[in-house]
Amino acid sequence: MDPLRPFFMEDYLEGSRFTARFNLGESGGRPITVGELLEGCGVAPARAADTFLSMLLRDSPNWGRADLRDAVAALHPGATRDNVLITTGTSEALLLLFRQLRPRRVALAWPAFQLLYELPLRQGAQVVRLPVRWDARGVPSVDAAEWLEVLEREQPDLVVINNPHNPSGLVLEPALLARVAGWADAAGAVVVGDEHYRFLSREDAVLGDTVYRPGARTFVTGSFIKCLGCPGLRIGWCVGDTDVLARVQNEKNYTTHTVNPVAEWLAYEVLRDVHGAALGRAREEWRQNRRTLSGFLERSRGVYGVAPQGGLVTCLGVRDVASERDFEARLAALTAQGVFVLPLSAMEAGSPEGTHPLARGHGFRLGLGISPARFPEALEAIERATTR
């Protein structure tokens, strides 16, 4: 992999994300308004207007608002305010964290969200692939023994745990997470958790498992902006060792410096009660779209796969694809139907030596971030485009 090539995934998304009739290429929830967000947080319009109009447009504290840091710390057992740095989205958190950690070999589930391997690659690190595999029905899984064998053989000094996983939609089992943590402890490796979809990872609870553990070698980046459909807030966080975060924050002083105070206010209103209506609405739409997708896949003749266990994306394979040219024709048919998806080749999942069609890139990442009222229509358009 060439560490100097452009971020192809983002370039691909930018081409149609604002114009497609059915935008299923995104990895976040349907966009919501500031009013919808605040209403879901129980903030009355009068109080919202008063707070917004009286807000001083000065710098926020460099580490982030104290009450917001407290709210983030409460999501990570054992963390305190001093273990939390508020950032301009998780992208900034990951960029600055990797710059401080300077890993030589980074292991992560493959295929992967592009940022998670492009950043260390551009610092000269090597990437170790921990395989995600699919069966004949398109059900993803990981083999814990295989992962541990790869880790023991390759000896990475940093392991990224993206959970729930983008693009497969897998939620990694606690037993697997414990085994990876045990290996990292024995090997002296750092664990970085990318937990962007943590609020949409369990049917029975708002919060899924976190890899965070107090200490010097575990870090977590996260946010709610994809889950809630408000990525324009650009709010994220990094949780971990205070001394390392202090160095991250010092470099942040010369990049974004501080987070926008309006965004911090909105983020605090969301996180002061994670059991409130805002996340409740997002979770109900997530559950509804998962049910819709599962029913569709049971009868589809054009595509196969499963609804995600967690998060807002999954991988679907296209049936009866014999070649790359054949798959490109199906993508063109999807475009003609007004459907925008992200081909797995844009995430560099395609491999000629792959033994499964999805491993060879003959499929696409499907986003569930669309109104439940429109999702069935979008799926029927996919069926028309992929069925001969």
Image (cartoon, rainbow, N blue to C red):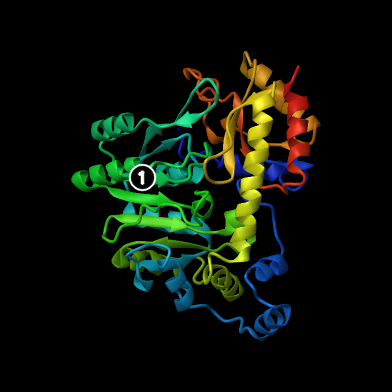
Looking at the rendered structure, the secondary structure element under dot 1 is helix
Residue 161 versus residue 284: which sits nearer the camera? Answer: 284
Give residue 184's position: percent from left, percent from top. 25, 45
**Quadrant location of the N terminus in the rendered image:** top left
Question: What amino acid type is highlighted by mark number 1?
Answer: Pro
Residue at the (32%, 29%) spot, across then down: 146
Specify the farthest residue to the top. Answer: 322
Seen in the image, is 123 located left or right of residue 8? left
Residue 351 appearing in the image: yes
Specify the farthest residue to the left. Answer: 186
Total residue callouts: 1
Seen in the image, is 22 located left or right of residue 254? right
**Quadrant location of the C terminus in the rendered image:** top right
Residue 285 versus residue 214: which sits nearer the camera? Answer: 285
Local crowd size for mark 1, using a 10 Å CA cut-off: few (<14), some (14–19), many (≥20): few
Give residue 217's position: percent from left, percent from top. 28, 55
Residue 337 versus residue 145: which sits nearer the camera? Answer: 145
Residue 65 appearing in the image: no
Q: Quadrant of residue 100?
A: bottom left
Specify the farthest residue to the front. Answer: 204
Residue at the (72%, 78%) spot, across then down: 45
Residue at the (47%, 17%) spot, across then down: 355
Give residue 188's position: percent from left, percent from top. 21, 48
Residue tagged 1: 174
Seen in the image, is 130 located left or right of residue 155? right
Seen in the image, is 194 located left or right of residue 275? left
Give residue 9's position: percent from left, percent from top. 59, 40
Residue at the (67%, 33%) spot, across then down: 295
